[in-house]
Image (cartoon, rainbow, N blue to C red):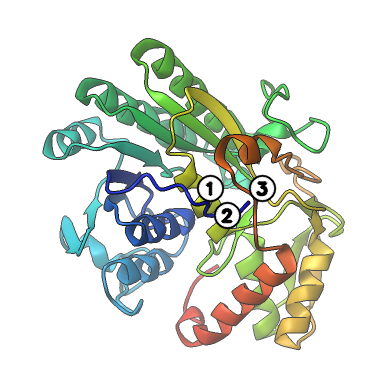
Amino acid sequence: MSAGGDESVGGQRILVTGAAGFIGARTCRMLLEQGHAVVGVDNLNDYYDVRLKDHRLDLLLGGDGTRMGADPRSSFFERESNWKHEEFTFLYLDIEDGGAVARLFERWRFDAVINLAARAGVRYSVEHPEVYASTNVSGAVNLLQAMARHGTRKYVLASSSSLYAGAAAPFKETADVTRPLSPYAASKLGAEAMASAFHNMHGIDVSVLRYFTVFGPAGRPDMSPLRFIKWIDEGTPIELFGDGTQARDFTFVDDIAAGTILALKPVGYEVINLGGGRQPMTINAMIRVIEARLRKTALVEHQEFHSGDMHSTQADVGKAARLLGWASQVDAVDGFGRTVDWYSANRDWLRKIVI
């Protein structure tokens, strides 16, 4: 089995929401490489430093990754409403705006929608649950309504392993996920439920993908991989929540993007795990791998473990193998090596990124 598989959905027009995001940008790139036309939308919000989103977008739009806004809250790509490079079109658009979504579907006919637009982050969701309900649930409903009205038949939804809190590992898709520990997880469960309802009402074919701790080059600066790499390199103490024995089923972004594209195949309605599928790596082990690659020693400041976090995650990926022919190809040690190498090659502008 391979991460990308041999199957192609060839020559479609795909709407990708959250196109400037970490997973979204990589998914757009792979779709374009497979010969699809891609319309990407993003509201370029400032949950984290927007210049990292600009870097990803600039590469998709034929640049070298250096066109960026002047500060962490301003995007270079807000200056126009429509950017295009070859078969990729980018629109500055918020899926929470139902009117804008409706006009988008009136302008183009889409073969499928990959919904990667979401507010992420467990801790931030505890303080701002209303934001997560608005984007992750209401925004998804806007897309599903437009799909039903215009006859778009395929929907791929990004969900999260955070739903498995309290379940026995390795996590299977059949686990009871009805008691989420955080507003973030609750919003993902709501988005899944809405997708199921639209499948039942309108026959939309739905692949729900529960991602497990995605990491890699140009990753989110609010997640530990990029933060820890930057802090260790600069000699800044790491803020480590808990004792570092918590473990994650780290999954490399290329594997996640490949699985997301494979999930465009017709499945009816299915929930599918996309995770590394190997022995989870502890945060302490992750730090050691980064230290070895950078040849520097981390300074660690321990903080209290957050009640909304999970101590360990581990994916059962048997269903992904059976339905999609998918398995992750990049293990955590290799993936962190690639991520540190990307950081080192982009160190000059990454110094400015606020984390």
x%, y% of residue 325?
59, 43
> Considering only vertical position in the picture, is 139 above or below 11?
above
- The amino acid at mark 2 is Ala
Picture disc at residue 3: 2
Q: CA distance from mark 2 to mark 1?
A: 7 Å
Horizontal side of residue 34 vs 318, given as left or right: left
Q: For numbered disc 1, what is the local secondary structure?
A: helix
Q: Select label 3 or label 1 by which is in front.
A: 1
Q: Nearer the viewer, residue 81 or 8?
A: 8
Structural crowding at the residue carrying mark 1, measured as other residues with C-alpha within 10 Å and reported as few (<14), some (14–19) or many (≥20) = many
Q: For numbered disc 2, what is the local secondary structure?
A: loop
- Judging by the rendered image, the residue that carries numbered circle 1 is 259
- Judging by the rendered image, the residue that carries numbered circle 3 is 275
- The amino acid at mark 3 is Gly
Q: For numbered disc 3, what is the local secondary structure?
A: loop
**Do tag 2 and tag 1 residues touch (Cβ < 8 Å)?**
yes
Residue at 44% from the left image edge and 60% from the top image edge: 26
x%, y% of residue 235?
70, 84
Q: Residue furthest left?
A: 107
Q: CA distance from mark 2 to mark 3?
A: 11 Å
Structural crowding at the residue carrying mark 3, measured as other residues with C-alpha within 10 Å and reported as few (<14), some (14–19) or many (≥20) = many
Residue at 30% from the left image edge and 56% from the top image edge: 35
State which tag comes first along the sequence, 2 or 1. 2
x%, y% of residue 155?
39, 32
Q: Nearer the viewer, residue 240 or 246?
A: 246
State which tag comes first along the sequence, 2 or 3. 2
- The amino acid at mark 1 is Gly
State which tag comes first along the sequence, 3 or 1. 1
Q: CA distance from mark 3 to mark 1?
A: 10 Å
What is the quadrant of residue 112 in the picture?
Answer: top left
